[in-house]
Amino acid sequence: MRGLSFKDALYKYFELKERNTTAKVEIIAGITTFLSMAYILFVNPSILTDGFTIALHQALGIPMTQPIPQEYMPLVYNVKLGFTLATALSAATATLIMSLYAKMPFGLAPGMGENAFIGYTAIPLFASILITSHDLQGVAPAIFAIYLALVSVFFNGILFLIFSVGRIREFILNSVPESIRLGISIGIGLFITLIGFSNIGIVEPGVGTPISFNTAALKTAAFYLGLLSFFIAAVLMAKKVIGGFIIAILGSTAIAILLSITGLTPGLISTSSSLFTMPSFTTSILNDLPKSFYLYFTLFGLGFPIAFSLFLVDFFDGIGTLTGLAMKAGLVKDGKVMNINKALISDALASIISPFYGTSTTVVYVESASGIEAGGKSGLTSLIIAILFFISAIFAPLFTYIPTFTTGGVLVLVGLLFLGLAGKLTSMEDLTEVIPAFFTLVAIPFTYSITTGIGFGFISYIVIKIASGKFKDVKPGIVLIALLFIIYFWLAARGF
């Protein structure tokens, strides 16, 4: 590109003329996508920090009905700050790789579903095992639970990278039935909605029932502000307003701040830490890499199924989202997505990098469709998204002041985005396909575990197919996956 002007070099590198677009259109598209997905800067740290507080309750021997003692709140804040910084930087780095290597107009950030899995399944599970089987005292089990969960993310990325190669990718795609893929996605959507209900305060553990309506929340301002966040997001979503989720979160947070500083409802916003705290990578696996890997491999019977479950979700969501967005952008030639291998490798590399920043798996965001609608067709769109995420990292301390209840309303609606796949499932006439998928989608929220739901789905698929005499539908790949989950459940029964 020697001798070319900056503009000409930009057009040549990102193939703007070939893709029938301009730099101005791409910049607008990048800003549009960023505004559509920027809510993750608040939601992801909230979910992952929730997982840490569950683990901290376990490590300190405190019932979940009691608050964390005040002396541990600076630790919780530093963890949330670490997750916030990692969210911004992992999103920026992942999207930058997609921009410069795959040259596709897609934004990436820690995935909804994957983060819930890490926060509400992996971190508490690792903490409980570390407390009972390893010589870790005080808060150490909770902290190392974060590291071990993120080591699982690292190996998920390795698996994703390996299976992104042509023939291996086809083997995996052909092994897992579409019905099970749909069941997993819908189940994750219901799981996220349940988390949103919990964050608002709508539900609580029941007395004599697994779950019940939290009538005590009706007396709290947080409950109504959470509902306000939901209604704002719902109306803006119905009107297709760009950035509706982030508007809902910031709007309800602003009201919470006013109520707090005026003294009408003190305590809505935590003011225990300074806005000028220097962000640090408190959740990065680099903080104690040797011990983290040692503990992970001693608990490999737990760690590998978690990594494998993440891989299944990440891999199929990645291919489905990439294909759908590419078709929308007109980046499909002869029935094949342009640069599909590079896009998948970008996604995999981003997942490998994420735990070193200190956050969960990054994925291609379906919200990229908003930028594509605005005309985005090239890696210049994703370059703009990456730059904006890098800039947002500066404001990490400010983002930690966003309360959980304001993100809860948005999470309820994020679950709705996954339910769009339900039509495909209900249109299937073969009940030997539908029933295992249904088992999967209800098991994920009702067991509060994505791993458990996926495992039940694969095992039930094989049992129902064989019992129904449909042996040809039982392929070697799905048998192998089911056997892995059977081993996982056997190890779980033995306490790993």
Image: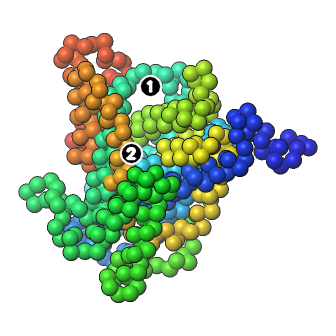
- Which quadrant does the N terminus fall into? top right
Residue 395 x/y as whole percent: 56, 69
Q: Is residue 278 among what the camera can see?
A: yes
* Quadrant of res 483: top left
Residue 160 x/y as whole percent: 50, 35
Q: Amino acid at mark 1?
A: Ile
Residue at the spot 24% in from the left edge and 68% down from the top edge? 62
Crowd tier of the residue under label 2, counting other residues whose Cα lies within 10 Å: few below 14, some 14–19, many 20 or above? few
Q: Is 312 positioned to the left or the right of 356 in the image? A: left
- Which quadrant does the C terminus fall into? top left
Q: Is 158 positioned to the left or the right of 449 in the image? A: right
Crowd tier of the residue under label 1, counting other residues whose Cα lies within 10 Å: few below 14, some 14–19, many 20 or above? some
Mark carried by residue 417 = 2
Question: From this viewpoint, which residue is outermost toward the front?
Answer: 239
**Viewer-closest of 259 and 89:** 259
Q: Is residue 292 among what the camera can see?
A: no
Residue at the spot 49% in from the left edge and 37% down from the top edge? 321
Q: Is residue 197 above or below residue 366?
A: below
**SS under mark 2:** helix
Residue highlighted by disc 1: 172
Q: Amino acid at mark 2?
A: Leu
Residue at the spot 47% in from the left edge and 33% down from the top edge? 320
Question: From this viewpoint, which residue is outermost toward the bottom?
Answer: 263
